Amino acid sequence: MSSYLLALSIGDYASLKAVTKVDKVLVRVWTWNGMQNYVEKALQSAVDTLDYMSTYLNQPCSLGKLDLVALPQFIGRAEGAMENWGLILGDYNEFLWHPDYSDTDTLNRVMEVISHETTHQWFGDLISPAWWQYLFLNEGFASYLYIDVISNYYPQQQAYADSRWFYNSESAMTEEESFGGLLPTIPEPSLVGSGQEGMFSISVYSKAAAILKMLRDTVGNVTFQTALRQYFKENQYTTVTDETLWGYVTQAAANAGIPNWNYDGFLNISSFMRPYTYQVGVILSNL
Ligand SMILES: [Zn+2]
C-alpha cells in the first residue's frame, strides 16, 4: 500500500450504513452528529459503485469495510475528496444532499464524487502508479467508470451519462487553453513536485478518460474488460506504469484477433497510445 493512502479520522460522528450485495462489504457514511440523514445518496452511490466494480473487474473489494467521512472543513484538491484506502474523506458539500434544499446539480455532484473516489479503491489503491507522472492510471479510470455506474443502475439517466462523456472530451480540449496550451496526459517527470501546473491537469483527468474510452471503443468492450481483469489479477498490491496496462490490452487484442492498421500483425497498444499520452494537444489524423 502506498503511504499517501493512509488516513485516520477522529470526531463526534454519526453514520448511515449498508452492506453491498456482491461482496457483503460494510459501507458507512459518517458526518457530524445530526446531519447523518443527508448522506443517503452518498451511501447509495458508494454501494452501487462497489458492486459494479467488483463484478466488472471480477476482483472483490479488497477490504471488508469502506468508511466515508463528510467533514465540515476539508482542505483537499479540486475534487474535494480523497480516496484513502478504506477511508474516503471529503468536504460535506460533496457528500450531503438535502431533499428540500439541495438541487439536481448537487445530486449529480454527490453521485460523481462518491463514485469517483470509490473507483479509486481499485484504480489507485489496489494498484498504484509507480510514480506520479502515471497518475492518469488512477484519475483517467475514476473520471469515466462512474459514468458506467450511472448507466448501469440508473438507465433513465442515460442522457445525462452521455453528456458526461461529451464533457470529458470537450473539457480536455478547451480548459487547458487557459494554460497557454495543452499538457500531456503523462507529464515530464521534472514537472512532478515542481509546483507547476501539470501533475493534476485536466489532461490527467478528462483527457485520460476520453482516450481510455477511445481505446475501449477501438478494441471493444469485452476485450478491454478481459485485459483489465488480467491486469488486476496479476498486479494487485503492486505499482505499475502505462506500459504495464498497455501490455495487457495488447495481449487481449491479439487474443481477440484485432489487426494493426496495416493488417500485417496485431494491434500494438503501446505504440497506438503513446502519441495520445506523451504528446501535447489533440492528435491530427490524416486519412
Ligand atoms: Zn481521483
Image (cartoon, helix red, strand yellow):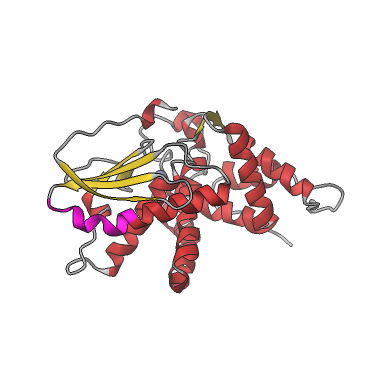
The residue at 30%/46% (across/down) is: 28
* Predominant SS along the magenta part: helix
Q: Quadrant of residue 201?
A: top left
User: In the image, is 138 to the left or to the right of 277?
Assistant: left
Is residue 203 visible from the viewing direction of this image? no
Q: Which residues are magenta?
A: 34-43
Question: Looking at this view, is 39 or 109 the one in front?
Answer: 39
> x%, y% of residue 204?
47, 45
- Above or below, 282 against 59 in this view is below
> x%, y% of residue 238?
54, 28
- Above or below, 154 against 135 in this view is below
> x%, y% of residue 147?
47, 60
User: In the image, is 271 to the left or to the right of 80?
Assistant: right
Is residue 117 visible from the viewing direction of this image? yes
Q: Indicate whether residue 179 is drawn in magenta.
A: no
User: Ligand 1 sits in which quadrant?
Assistant: top left
The residue at 85%/53% (across/down) is: 263
